[in-house]
Image (cartoon, rainbow, N blue to C red):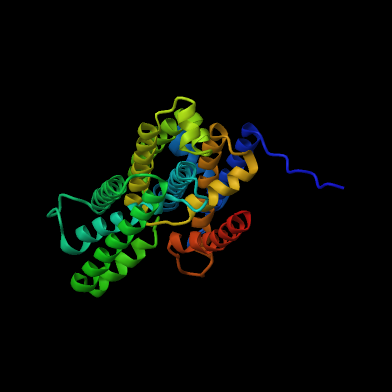
């Protein structure tokens, strides 16, 4: 007997499941911590803040829920959604199952920009740490784009240019830290480089959400082109798609999304690799469904990872990038092995 093929979920069904999972993950993110807060008290805080109710809540606990944990969960969901969208787009554009946002060297450039502000004081106080990271990410993307274009373009050239850019900016970061940073700065930099949601506040979410919304809208508008790119650039050109223009546009969108997220939460890896593959298995390869589904799944993944970062080691919060790597590295190995078998 032939085994039954897996029946993929429709987007509405997947969306309902993902939203329920996101709600549960967010509830855990808000209630779990050094100060445990029961669900009833969380509901009171939400009632006061969202609906103007006047329920009796301890002011300290209300501050923890609203200003710290809920804003942190919202930032985690936004970051996960953005990185998952970037991974989905890059895997289609480059036709490479291992493609993810950090392939373009943007993470390394953001790290260099942040280190320049933190250690050398570039900007004389007018440039913040996120601002320096964003500028560094933009510079890295420009360098990779220039190098790829100068070497003839093509997906292989983009990948090689991204590797070269990553090595260059990682070396610059290491040089600055080694020669100029003191012990305290080095500890702060290393924690930031591994990803951190500890400083996430509503102002950060207010910056991330519009960028996420615009990026998702542009990618959805190009969903048909992404479907065609999955079969190669010649296939895309044969149905009237301006390959060069669309590819440049989508690379720029992924660079903007990645730079914005890295500048806010630091370098978090593997989200853009793991989530698109899992989501593609559940909803199929059509990007009209895959992009919003990946965004939802990425949000759930990051919020759940944030919860794990607080409970894996009692009394200590792990960098979020460590947790995502614990899941992402085995997934990377599995995808690599599977793609080799399919070759």
Q: Is residue 325 above or below residue 297?
A: below
Residue found at the very far top of the displayed protein: 240
Q: Nearer the viewer, residue 248 or 266?
A: 248
State the image quarter where residue 251 is shown.
top left
Residue found at the very far left of the displayed protein: 124
State the image quarter where residue 165 is shown.
bottom left
Image point (60%, 41%), residue name: 18
Image point (31%, 51%), residue name: 263
Q: Is residue 109 visible?
A: yes
Q: Is residue 199 visible?
A: no
* Image-based side of 207 in relation to 28, left or right: left
* Image-based side of 46 in relation to 215, left or right: right
Image spot of residue 132 (x, y percent): 23, 52
* Image-based side of 246 in relation to 304, left or right: left
Image spot of residue 35 (x, y percent): 48, 60
Q: Nearer the viewer, residue 248 or 203?
A: 248
Image point (21%, 67%), residue name: 176
Q: Nearer the viewer, residue 266 or 245?
A: 245
Residue found at the very far right of the displayed protein: 1
Q: Can you say which quadrant of the picture contains the C terminus?
A: bottom right
Image spot of residue 147 (x, y percent): 28, 50
Q: Nearer the viewer, residue 308 or 263?
A: 263
Image spot of residue 114 (x, y percent): 26, 57
Q: How many marks?
A: 0
């Amino acid at each position: 007997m032939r085994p039954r093929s897996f029946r993929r979920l429709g987007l509405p069904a997947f969306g309902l499941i993902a939203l329920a999972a996101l709600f549960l993950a967010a509830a855990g993110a808000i209630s779990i911590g050094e100060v445990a807060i029961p669900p009833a008290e969380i509901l009171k805080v939400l009632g006061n803040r969202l609906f103007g109710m006047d329920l009796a809540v301890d002011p300290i606990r209300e501050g923890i829920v609203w200003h710290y944990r809920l804003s942190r969960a919202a930032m985690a969901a936004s970051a996960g959604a953005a990185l998952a969208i970037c991974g989905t787009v890059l895997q289609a554009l480059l036709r490479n199952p291992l493609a993810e946002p950090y392939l373009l060297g943007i993470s390394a450039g953001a790290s260099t920009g942040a280190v320049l502000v933190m250690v050398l004081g570039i900007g004389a106080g007018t440039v913040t740490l996120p601002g320096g990271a964003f500028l560094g990410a933009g510079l890295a993307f420009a360098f990779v784009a220039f190098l790829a274009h100068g070497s003839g373009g093509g997906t292989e050239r983009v990948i090689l240019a991204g590797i070269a850019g990553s090595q260059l900016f990682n070396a610059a970061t290491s040089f600055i830290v080694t020669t100029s940073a003191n012990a305290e700065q080095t500890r702060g930099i290393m924690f930031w480089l591994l990803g951190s949601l500890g400083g996430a506040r509503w102002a950060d979410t207010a910056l991330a959400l519009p960028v996420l919304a615009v990026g998702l809208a542009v990618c959805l508008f190009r969903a048909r082109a992404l479907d065609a790119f999955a079969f190669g650039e010649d296939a895309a050109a044969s149905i009237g798609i301006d390959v060069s223009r669309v590819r440049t546009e989508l690379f720029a969108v992924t660079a903007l999304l990645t730079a914005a997220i890295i500048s806010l939460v630091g370098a978090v890896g593997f989200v853009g690799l793991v989530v698109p593959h899992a989501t593609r298995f559940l909803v199929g390869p059509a990007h009209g469904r895959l992009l919003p589904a990946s965004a939802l799944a990425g949000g759930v993944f990051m919020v759940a990872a944030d919860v794990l970062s607080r409970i894996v080691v009692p009394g200590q919060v792990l960098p979020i990038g460590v947790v995502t790597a614990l899941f992402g590295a085995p997934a990377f190995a599995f995808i690599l092995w599977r793609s080799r078998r399919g070759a």
